[in-house]
Image (cartoon, rainbow, N blue to C red):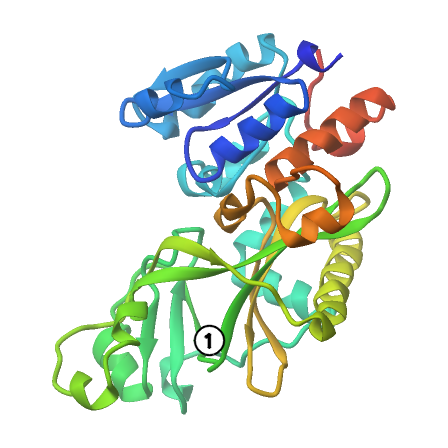
């Protein structure tokens, strides 16, 4: 039954994990690649088909062709980076996930309201640079892999370095602690929430600067940047797992109220900082598979607790689609704008 549908995604971000998982669950696979990535994706036998475009922004021109191929699109962070919110909403082909969540994820203000309604603890947010009375992070809107983040010491530093920014941004209190990214999967079919894995990000050049003693940094003309270049795995203290699970449950519960009835389902990630008193501060939420899950293509310690086989987040998505097909519940795992043929 699975071979009647093809799982497809853009050739970037977590495409290999998504397509390997789809292959392992018995689906045909298709990648939309560009000239720079074509040779890479052709080297993997689990990818059955490829469409090559000059740039990923041309994706919307492929909709009719993808519809004729009975494709189910699995989105990831590069969809957010290369396609506009309006283009997402116009996409009528079968789409794993709920597009109604995108508005809440894309707006820093709406996202903050969502997380606060879920009872999560968030850093203080400043409306203007003049209010800054402690170290902050200035974040540009959108999924850009940490690009454009700026560390600011005080209001004077903001006026000197960030007041000129023309892009939309937010000013957020800088929390000192351990960054932890918790990867979840929520099944719309069973209603079950799973913790799939966890990671930390390796960011340049801030992680390199952290290795230089503070005294040696004085006078250096280097501004910290937070561009993500890789990820490393983390295992959380078991005594803290209950709170991590609670956060995921409450985020899903509130999502059904603000963008129901389906709310948030499938893969998502809550990005946190853990302080020395073991309190979670939530920085933001990503309402889709995140690149940190690429560490766990063969499964993680947490996924192994639920599955006696390798279970990546990519494969878990394909497993949900497969279960939906077998139980005649495909519309439960697709956005309501999806046109099935």
Q: Quadrant of residue 7?
A: top right
The residue lying toward the viewer, choosing from 255 and 268, is 268
In the rendered image, residue 104, in percent from the top left (x then y), is placed at 61, 54
Q: Which image quarter: residue 265? A: top right
- Residue that sits furthest to the front in the current view: 308
x and y percentages locating residue 333 in the rendered image = 75, 33
Q: Nearer the viewer, residue 269 or 133?
A: 269
63 up-or-down from 205: above or below: above
Going by the image, does 48 lie left or right of 236?
left
For label 1, the SS is strand
- In percent of the image, x 43 and y 15: which residue is there? 50
Give coordinates of residue 124: x percent, y percent. 53, 81
Read off the residue under disc 1. 172
> Residue at point 70% right, 37% down?
309
Quadrant where the N terminus sits is: top right
**Residue closest to the eye, 315 or 261:** 315
Q: Is residue 336 visible?
A: no
Q: What is the quadrant of residue 208 in the picture? A: bottom left
Which residue is rendered at x = 67% and y = 63% of the image?
A: 114
Task: Tell me: residue 25, above or below residue 109.
Answer: above
Please tell me which residue is depicted at 74% across the width and 54% down the height of the picture.
255
């Amino acid at each position: 039954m699975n071979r009647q549908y093809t799982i497809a995604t853009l050739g970037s971000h977590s495409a290999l994990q998504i397509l390997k998982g789809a292959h392992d669950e018995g689906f045909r696979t298709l990648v939309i690649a560009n000239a720079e990535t074509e040779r890479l994706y052709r080297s993997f036998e689990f990818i059955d088909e490829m469409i090559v475009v000059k740039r990923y922004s041309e994706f919307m021109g492929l909709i009719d062709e993808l519809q004729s191929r009975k494709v189910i699109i699995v989105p990831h962070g590069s969809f957010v980076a290369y396609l506009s919110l309006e283009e997402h909403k116009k996409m009528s082909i079968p789409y794993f996930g709920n597009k109604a969540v995108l508005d809440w994820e894309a707006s820093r203000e709406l996202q903050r309201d969502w997380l606060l309604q879920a009872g999560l603890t968030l850093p203080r947010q400043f409306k203007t640079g003049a209010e800054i009375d402690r170290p902050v992070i200035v974040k540009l809107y959108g999924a850009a892999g940490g690009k454009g983040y700026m560390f600011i010491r005080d209001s004077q530093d903001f006026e000197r370095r960030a007041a000129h920014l023309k892009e939309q941004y937010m000013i957020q209190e800088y929390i000192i602690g351990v960054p932890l990214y918790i990867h979840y999967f929520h099944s719309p079919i069973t209603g079950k929430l799973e913790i799939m894995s966890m990671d930390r990000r390796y960011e340049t050049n801030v992680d390199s600067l952290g290795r230089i003693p503070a005294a040696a940094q004085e006078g250096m003309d280097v501004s910290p940047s937070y561009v993500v270049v890789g990820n490393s795995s983390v295992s959380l203290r078991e005594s803290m797992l209950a709170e991590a699970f609670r956060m995921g449950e409450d985020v899903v519960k509130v999502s059904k109220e603000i963008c129901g009835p389906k709310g948030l389902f499938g893969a998502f990630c809550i990005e946190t900082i853990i302080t020395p008193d073991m309190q979670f501060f939530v920085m933001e939420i990503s309402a889709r598979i995140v690149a940190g899950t690429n560490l766990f293509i063969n499964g993680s310690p947490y996924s192994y607790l639920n599955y006696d086989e390798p279970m990546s987040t990519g494969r878990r998505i394909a497993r949900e689609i497969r279960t939906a097909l077998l139980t005649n519940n495909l519309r439960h795992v697709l956005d309501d704008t999806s046109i099935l043929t």
